[in-house]
Every structure is written in C-alpha cells, then in structure tokens.
Image (spheres, rainbow, N blue to C red):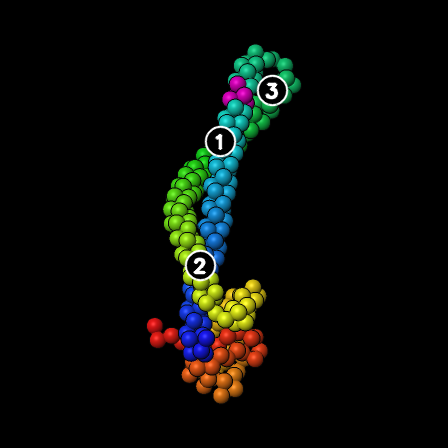
Amino acid sequence: MDPKTLNNILVEISEFEDLLLQASQKLEHNTQLTFSLEELQAEYESDAADAARLNQGAEVTLRSLENEITQVAQLLKVKQEMLVGLTDRRQVRAVADEISQLKQRLDNLENDTIQLLDQQDLLKSDAVESQGESRTHGTNCRAKQEAMAADSAQLSQKTKHIQNDMDRLISMLPPTEGRAVIRLREKLEQAVVHHHEGACQGCFHQLPQQQAISVDGGRHIVRCPSCMRFLVHRSWR
C-alpha cells in the first residue's frame, strides 16, 4: 500500500477516534449528571422528611399540652370546690397555695401552647413547601433522566456503528500498521492524532520541524517519537 493511501486511511481512523472520544465524554457527562440529579433529589426528599418530622413532633407536643391543660384545669376546679367547704386555716392556706400553683401552671401551659401554635403554622408551611419542592424536582429529575437515558442509548448505538466502521478501516491497513493501531488503542484513547504548531496532540511532544512538514504532506508515515501514535494531517472535511 502506498504511503498516501495509508495516510488517508489513518486520517479516517483519526476522525472515527475523535467521534468515539466525543461520544464517550458525552456518555460520561450523562452518567455524572444523572448521579448529581439523584443526589440532589435525595437531599430534597431528606429536607421534606425532616420538615414533616418537625411538624409531626410539634403536633404531638401540642396534643400533650392540651391534655395537660385539661388535667390541670380539672384539678384546679376540684381544689376550688374543696376550698369552699374548708374551715381549718391551715387547710385553707395549703389548698389556696395549691390553687395558686395550679393557676400559674395553667398560665404557663397556655402560653406554651400559644407559642407552639405560632411555630406550628411555620412548620406546616415549611413541610408543605418542602414536599412541593421535592415533588417538583422529582418530576423534573425523572424527565431529565429519561431524556439522558434516550440520548445515551442513541450514543451507544452510534458508537457501535463507528467502532464497526473503524474496525473495517483497521483491517484494510497493512499487518504491521494494523497491529500497531490495535496495540495503541488498547492502551490509549487514540492511536492516530493530528499535530498542532509542531506538537503531537496525543502527548504534546514537540516534533522536529521536518517531521511536522512530513505529516502535513501526507506522503510519509510519521509516528510520534514520544508516545508512538501515528501523526496525520487534518482532513479537508
């Protein structure tokens, strides 16, 4: 096979390798974005669960306060009725002290209940808002994941076709160059690269000027002296 034809095949292999690399990067991007969306959704769900627990805890505490208010009020009524029938001063004083303590306790409980009711309004609002945000993000997340899954499936299918075309081109190479390309692809993402301003775009090794000229001419087989990749000129396409 003459060097010019061989170079043209290598140029096409390089273009397919570029396409494979782009597809691989996009697939990796889709995977990372999917993972990030799942992590973010987990945070939304955790926040919603925390807000719901706080709201439920406030409701439990409120019921407990209301029960205690009822018990204290009933006991206060009993003590007040008891006070009416007492004649002994010591007993009167003792019951009166108990009534005073119960009234103070009742005031404290009612104040705590009022404060908790104010807090509960905020907690309910936070719980509803957090649940809404979690559902909204979950819906958007699923839509994005479905779109990325479809995109990834298309990319995977496209990758198979590109790989088949590249395998066909590699089979057209002379045995020595074909084996070299296969070995390079086993270790590196690209076996055939271009050069830019005299540097290999695989390892960025600076080429001797004559080698760079030979690459641009496309009439000689040139390999990077550092990474051993094949170096080719850019296709007119």
Q: Quick one: 220 or 195, which is closer to the camera?
A: 220
Spot the residue most to the right.
Answer: 90
The answer to whether residue 115 is seen in the rendering is: no
The part of the image, by quadrant, that contains residue 163 is bottom left
Please provide percent x and percent y for residue 211: 50, 85
Indicate the quadrant where residue 71 lies. top right
23 magenta-colored: no
The CA distance from mark 3 to mark 1 is 34 Å
Tag 3: amino acid: Val
Distance from disc 1 to disc 2, alpha carbons, whole Å, reads 65 Å
Question: Which stretch appears magenta?
Answer: 70-74
Indicate left or right for 219 with 177 as reference. Answer: left
Asked whether the viewer can see residue 66, the reply is yes
Disc ID at residue 95: 3
**Quarter of the image that includes the C terminus:** bottom left
User: Where does the image place residue 209, in percent across and percent down from the top left?
Assistant: 49, 88
Q: Look at label 2 and name its amino acid.
A: Asn
**What residue occupies the far left of the structure in this picture?**
237
Tag shown at residue 234: none
Residue displayed at 57% across by 14% down: 82
- From mark 3 to mark 2, how far is it between C-alphas? 97 Å
Q: Secondary structure at mark 3?
A: helix
